[in-house]
């Protein structure tokens, strides 16, 4: 790799790189990806080991602070997060002002922006105590906001967080518990969700993380930066793909179109149709996260006693695509989003909640990357160049 910033500054040249395909915007010590070999590591630890043995909060600590926590550090972190789960009561009125048809991702990003209004007096990005406090607040409150967005969309009453429960169990209860009924967390579902969240925790400079860093580079606080990141994640080419995959599978099933015919339409780029959940800017091999998700899909569905023909459809699609020259030549493989939706659906989440689950997963990465950028003395305000292609100078009519 070459540092072209000095070269371009000294020579007055500008490098044009649509989509930042070849341009690094930063150095980072958080996540390592080798897209050709399908390797993903957080702070040096292989994703496979973390997904199998760790917890969401332990990985969050690892990403944010750089090392695995000791048992007492983790216990203290967990305790602090449990103490910050409550939302200000007034925020409930914010939710009731939105239509029940609102997409939960729009609710999530708006509510995170709204959350910042309660902490403006403690949101100085240059004050380490504020940064620490808001890291805890975000980790504690985002799942509660997410669950309220879900409850709102199905017209059910919000539950208060149950701080006797761990992070994932509390989240499940907030989503699936009902007032005046006892909710027993299913350990299979809890562990399966924890694993999926771990797989999403960071992925270096993807569109949403780059957005968080770019907004942060202006001196904006964590709430504003992360709200912007949530909006970037919402798009169907990024986190929104998990919802788009399920919609695509359901459409194929309902239309009666054969999988082969659908693949032909993708290859012919008919109406711009894509095989959602396939392809990745960095992975030119099987996405290691997709491998893990696929492995757990059968396991989780059978443990939950669910059989879903959409899983068989997804496998059939994958089989046909992987043996087809169009996908082979372009090195298109399933990405993390291809199989997650089938599992979320089996757990009982509506399709529109899938990207919200991605956002909860990605939050520790956004926080870690925002903090890393803030602590790096080389960070400057992000300000891409352009090559102007418009009109030359001309006069306003009549002058
Ligand atoms: N289906 C069909 N063709 C595809 C797909 C796909 N899913 N993905 C890429 N291609 C084709 C492109 O049309 C292009 O073909 P061409 O050379 O004939 O023009 C070629 O493969 C290269 O693709 P690009 O669009 O240049 O690749 P890029 O790196 O810019 O895009 C992206 C990556 C956005 C992920 C793309 O593969 C895509 O749109 N996938 C579907 C959406 C998706 O699953 N997104 C989730 C990504 S993972 C994540 O965010 C968590």
Image (cartoon, grey):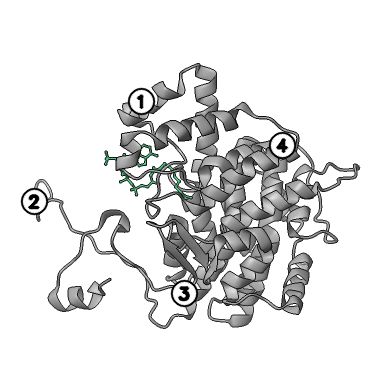
- Mark closest to the chain's N terminus, 1 or 4: 1
Q: Nearer the viewer, mark 2 or mark 4?
A: 4
Observer-side mark, 3 or 2, equals 3
Q: Classify mark 1: helix, strand or loop.
A: helix
At 65% from the left and 29% from the top, the residue drawn is 308
Q: Which residue is mark 1?
A: 265
Query: Picture quarter containing residue 143?
Result: bottom right
Calculate the distance from the C-alpha at mark 3 to the C-alpha at mark 2: 57 Å
Q: Nearer the viewer, mark 1 or mark 4?
A: 4
Quadrant where the N terminus sits is bottom left
Q: Which residue is mark 3?
A: 29
| Tag 4 secondary structure | helix
Label 4, on which residue? Answer: 302
Question: Residue at the spot x=55%, y=34% of the render?
Answer: 246
Q: Dividing the image into four equal quarters, which quarter contains ligand 1?
A: top left
Q: Residues within 10 Å of mark 4 (few under 14, many from 20)?
A: few
* Disc 2 secondary structure class: loop
Inspect this view and state whether residue 147 appears.
Answer: yes
């Amino acid at each position: 790799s070459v540092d072209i910033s000095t070269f371009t500054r000294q020579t007055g040249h500008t490098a044009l790189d649509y989509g930042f395909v070849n341009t690094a915007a930063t150095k980072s010590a958080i996540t390592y990806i080798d897209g050709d070999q399908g390797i993903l590591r957080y702070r040096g630890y292989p994703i496979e080991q973390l997904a199998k043995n760790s917890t969401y909060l332990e990985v969050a600590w690892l990403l944010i602070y750089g090392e695995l926590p000791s048992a007492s550090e983790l216990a203290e972190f967990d305790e602090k997060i449990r103490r910050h789960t409550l939302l200000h009561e007034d925020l409930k009125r914010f939710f009731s002002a939105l239509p029940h048809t609102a997409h939960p991702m729009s609710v999530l990003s708006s509510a995170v922006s709204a959350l910042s209004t309660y902490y403006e007096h403690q949101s100085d990005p240059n004050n380490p105590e504020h940064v620490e406090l808001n890291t805890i607040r975000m980790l504690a409150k985002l799942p509660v906001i997410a669950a309220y967005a879900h409850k709102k969309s199905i017209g059910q009453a919000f539950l208060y967080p149950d701080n006797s429960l761990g992070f994932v169990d509390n989240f499940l209860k907030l989503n699936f518990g009902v007032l005046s009924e006892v909710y027993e967390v299913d350990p299979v579902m809890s562990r399966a969700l924890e694993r999926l969240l771990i797989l999403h925790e960071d992925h270096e400079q993807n569109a949403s993380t780059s957005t968080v860093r770019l907004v942060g580079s202006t001196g904006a606080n964590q709430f504003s930066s992360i709200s912007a990141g949530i909006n970037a994640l919402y798009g169907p080419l990024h986190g929104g793909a998990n919802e788009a995959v399920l919609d695509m599978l359901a459409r194929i099933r309902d239309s009666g179109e054969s999988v082969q015919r659908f693949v032909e339409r993708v290859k012919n780029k008919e109406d711009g149709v894509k095989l959602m959940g396939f392809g990745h800017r960095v992975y030119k091999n099987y996405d290691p996260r997709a491998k893990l998700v696929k492995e757990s899909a059968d396991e989780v569905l059978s443990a939950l006693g669910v059989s879903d023909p959409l899983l068989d459809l997804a496998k059939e699609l994958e089989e046909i695509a992987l043996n087809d020259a169009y996908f082979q030549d372009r090195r298109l493989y399933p990405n993390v989003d291809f199989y997650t939706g089938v599992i979320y659906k089996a757990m009982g989440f509506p399709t529109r909640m899938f990207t919200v689950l991605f956002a909860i997963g990605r939050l520790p990465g956004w926080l870690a990357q925002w903090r890393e950028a803030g602590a790096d003395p080389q960070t400057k305000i992000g300000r891409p160049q352009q090559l102007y292609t418009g009109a030359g100078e001309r006069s306003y009519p009549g002058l």
